Amino acid sequence: MNERTLNKDLPSVIGKIVSIAGWVDVRRDHGKLIFLDMRDRSGIVQVVATPKAAEALETAKTLRAQWVVEIEGEVKERPENMRTEDVLGGIELVASSIRILSPAQELPFEVDTEVNIDTRFDYLPLTLRSRRSRDIFTMEATILEAYRKSLRTQEFVEFQAPALVGGDAEGGAAAFKVAYYDEHTAFLATSPQFYKEIMVGPFERAFTQSTGESVPEAEIAFWNGHRFWTTIGPFLTTQTALWMIVTLVGVYAIVRRRQQRAAQRKRWEEQGFD
């Protein structure tokens, strides 16, 4: 196999033999042709297995959703009437060999199926693979990175507050005990506030991302209300708006995916595929 190429880089190597690796998102059996939607961290690309590569075609027939595979083949432009509006909808990989890296058990439901909250959490390793979940986490990561970048440019130092402590530093009534190396008892930290105040001493400005918080928490010395709000306030006042954006992105992703699937099914029907 050649060195792995990410899906997002395939448009720049049209006509070349490359190797990709990822998860089978969707498999479509059209008899003499098998189509695969292959997903990696950079995107989804269509792979087609043809009778010209008989061994690859036979392997493709055994594949199922979420199997992890490595595929080698030639990158080609898709026919005009088969192109989609996806980022990689104008190309496909014609497989010459397929190697199964890790098969998956039969799925209880399709990844993009809308399920209730209990089912979602019971099958979280699976439901997190949906396009909606991936879009939400990508947006969240972008927001947090922008927040961190802004704080660093203002000379804040990031630190990691302890998750386990010897006692409840906040003095609250609800302290959760944890068995620690059998002979000792520790407690789950309820807040990083105590540690933020400690870090202000040596660094003046500090922030940390605590468990359960949607954005990092910052602490600053030598401040008045105006300076604090000028430095930190815009992020805190827009926190709700940011999470509304995340939700809207998720909704948009679902609607867009449905539209794309409907358009794809229509094209298949027009070409005589079931």
Image (cartoon, grey):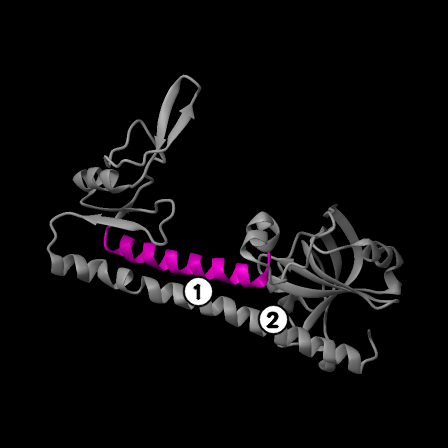
Q: Quadrant of residue 160?
A: top left
Kindly identify the amino acid type of the residue bearing the numbered disc 1: Val
Q: Quadrant of residue 192?
A: top left
Main secondary structure type of the part rendered in magenta:
helix
Q: Badge 2 is on which residue?
A: 257
Tell me if 114 is positioned left or right of 189 in this view: right
Q: Give the crowd class for mark 1: few <14, some 14-19, many >=20 residues within 10 Å.
A: some
Q: Is residue 136 magenta?
A: yes
Mark number displayed over residue 36: none
Residue 52 visible in the shown view: yes
Asked whether 33 or 273 is in front, the reply is 273
Q: Residue at the location (70% across, 76% down)?
A: 264
Which residue range is magenta in the image?
128-155
Tell me if 39 is positioned left or right of 138 in this view: right
Kindly identify the amino acid type of the residue bearing the numbered disc 2: Arg
Residue 217: x percent and y percent? 28, 49
Q: Badge 1 is on which residue?
A: 246
Tell me if 28 is positioned left or right of 238 in this view: right
Q: Give the crowd class for mark 2: few <14, some 14-19, many >=20 residues within 10 Å.
A: some
Whichever of labels 2 and 1 marks the residue nearer the N terminus, that label is 1
Residue 256: x percent and y percent? 57, 74
Q: Is residue 192 above or below residue 36?
A: above
